[in-house]
Amino acid sequence: MSIPIKINIMGVEYTLTSDDDPEHLHRVAGLVDERMRLINRMQPKISPQKGAVLAALNIADELIRLRQQMRYNQEEAAEFQQQAAERARQLIKLCSQE
């Protein structure tokens, strides 16, 4: 069941309705608030709208990079698994020859 959850980003309160865990939504809002505040400190004269766009771009960049790294790690793990399976077959073959 959806419940209303109040979050605060850059001093503005928003009410979200979600089935997600409220603590999760507060962490998400905290990340957005943190990134927007960082951008605001770096460029104090930037409009809130531009700050939000830059924060979104920053978070999207991080997400894409993490997804790429995850795919690479999955491919590496699959390759190691194949190598381990091949070595296990070789060991079994050697043991059965004795």
Image (cartoon, helix red, strand yellow):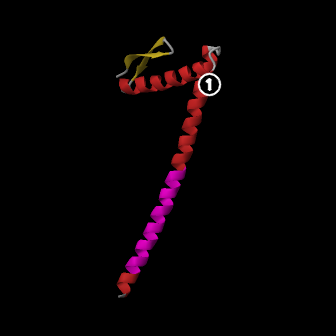
State the residue in front, 4 or 10: 10
Q: Residue at horizontal 56%, vertical 45%?
A: 68
Percent x, y for residue 18? Answer: 41, 22
Secondary element at tag 1: helix
Percent x, y for residue 42? Answer: 61, 22
Q: Residue at horizontal 43%, vertical 68%?
A: 85
Percent x, y for residue 89? Answer: 42, 75
Location of residue 87 with respect to 8 vertically, above or below: below
Task: Give the residue type that dot 1 points to.
Answer: Leu
Report the predominant secondary structure element of the magenta stretch. Answer: helix
State the residue in front, 97 or 57: 57
Residue under numbered circle 1: 54
Q: In the figure, residue 48 lies in which quadrant? A: top right
Asked if the stretch drawn in magenta spans residue 75, the answer is yes
Q: Residue at horizontal 39%, vertical 17%?
A: 5
Q: Residue at horizontal 42%, vertical 18%?
A: 17
In the image, which residues are magenta? Answer: 72-93
| On-image quarter of the N terminus | top left
State the residue in front, 40 or 55: 40
Left or right placement of residue 84 versus residue 56 in this view? left
